[in-house]
Structure formats: structure tokens, C-alpha cells
Amino acid sequence: MSIIIKDLVHVYNPDSPFETVALSNINFKIEKGEFVGLIGHTGSGKSTLIQHLNGLLKATSGKIYINDLDISQKDVKLSEVRKKVGLVFQYPEYQLFEETVFKDVAFGPFNLGLEQKEIESRVKEALEIVGLNFEEIKDRSPFELSGGQRRRIAIAGVIAMKPEVLILDEPTAGLDPEGRDEILAQIKELHSKYKMTVILVSHSMEDIARLVNKIIVMDKGKVALIGTPREVFKKADILEKIGLGVPQITYLVRKLREKGIAIREDVLTVDEAKEEIIKLIRGKKHA
């Protein structure tokens, strides 16, 4: 499922003393099956932007195409769009409300009017995708589980709708390192195994660098940069000017290069740095 944004503008409280331009002249395309990172400092327009992609917010002007369907048209059934574009808000566990895990994950599929057998199949599959055992957890209350488990249950509720696009707004916010790594591993598997288009909003440059294949950088309601991780993080000066940065390992590599160590300039992840350092050590041994 492709997404095309053309000249998107969103104004909060128009024609009032509180008028605020949140998005201005946004243009980009996301191809089917891409893993996109959306970054920008607080107030840059990220959350406003993603809420347009399944019709939660209506554009002041501009066009939003989901598979060639202009969802900004008045006659579009947004309920149909939301079946295809799943949005997981920050701290989604706060939206859990049913008495059992099964009922919570089944809520979306039930409202699609599916048969009970299909609902059960979807709930089981969604829970397994996020790393939870269906039989062990289905009858438990979500409120007696850990924060990381509740986060995964909330994500499973969206996955059970079988969207073609999955948008996640800071899915690891507030989690401990182990819980964060588990959630990110499951998101990566979702993308690779199910060929789902994924849009990940994150403040972690490290996570973005190792997961996505395209980055969209927002600043003051506009797209400041767009490109592959190597293309975007190569422009550290621009990122720093708008209050962002590059992965910490990239700064380390720069320091090594300043000291005359011949290591690749475009290293973005710890694994890449490890490979480069091993090559250097082996090269010296054979010299």
C-alpha cells in the first residue's frame, strides 16, 4: 500500500487568535513495504502528520492518497481506510479497557463484523506476533501484567485488524532496555515477515539508523530532509541546527577519523563499527 502526500497543510484553530500552522506544504511518497522513520523535535509536526494518514485529522488543504484513493474527499468512508492503516499511539496500554486480554485484542476484529472463528484466529496470531503465548495469557486481565506486556497487547489489538500500514508513535517510550529491545525486534519481524509498510516515530537516532530504510525529518511543520539513513545522517550539521543529531556511534567514528584512524565515515550502527574495527585489526596483523 503506497502513501502519497501532496501540498498538505494543517492549521489548528483557524481564524482565531490561537491559529497555529502545524503542517505546511508537506510532500512525500512512501512505497508499499517500506520501513520509514519519522523524526523531529517536539512540536515539529510528527504527531499531527501521522493522524492525517488514517483520517483522524482532516487536512486544511492538500491531498492524501492511500493506494490512489484520495482520503481527503468528503465521500470517502474513513472506517474502510482505518482497516488498512493501523495507528498505535504513544503509551497505547492506557487505551486497554476490557476485562481479559482476549477481549481487548478481539475488540477491533469484532467491530469488523467477523465470525467468531476468524476473530479467535486473528487474536491468537496477533498475540504470537508480539511474543505472547495465547493459551497462557488470553484469559488474564491486562491490568495485572507488566508494562511491556500491556504495550504488546495494545499493539496486538491493532495487528489483529490486519492493516497494510502500521504507524507507531514512540512505541518504546517509558520501557526498560529489555522491553524496548523486545518491542523493536517484533516490529522489525512484522516488517520483514509480513511485508507490512511500517512508519516508526522515534527520538532514538540509534533505533532509526538500524531499523528503517527511509527517514523523513520534520522541522517546524515542514519536511526538512528525506532520504536513506546514510543520506540523512551525513547531514549532521543540518540535523544539529534543528535540535536533532546522529547516532552516537557516528560521533565516535568521527573522533576516530580525526585521530587518523582509517575507518569508514558513514558507519551508523554498533554492528557496522564492530565490523570496521575488526577489519582494521586484521589488516594491521597482516601488514
Image (cartoon, helix red, strand yellow):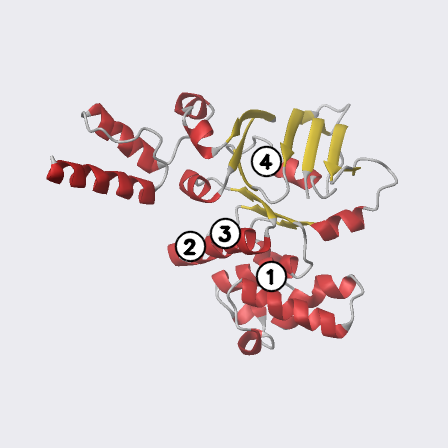
Between discs 3 and 1, the one toward the N terminus: 1
Disc number placed over residue 188 in the picture, else none: 3
Q: Secondary structure at mark 1?
A: helix
Front residue (pair 282, 175): 282
CA separation in Å, label 3 and label 1? 14 Å
Mark 3 or 2: the one toward you: 3
On the image, numbered disc 1 is attached to which residue?
A: 156
Q: Residues within 10 Å of mark 2 (few under 14, many from 20)?
A: some
Instruction: Identify which residue is drawn at 71% across, 50% down.
Output: 84
Q: Residue furthest right?
A: 75
CA separation in Å, label 4 and label 2? 23 Å
Q: Secondary structure at mark 2?
A: helix
Front residue (pair 285, 108): 285
CA separation in Å, label 3 and label 2? 10 Å
On the image, numbered disc 4 is attached to which residue?
A: 46
Q: List x then y, in percent, for residue 164.
A: 67, 50
Disc number placed over residue 181 in the picture, else none: 2
Front residue (pair 130, 180): 130
Mark 4 or 2: the one toward you: 2
Between discs 4 and 2, the one toward the N terminus: 4
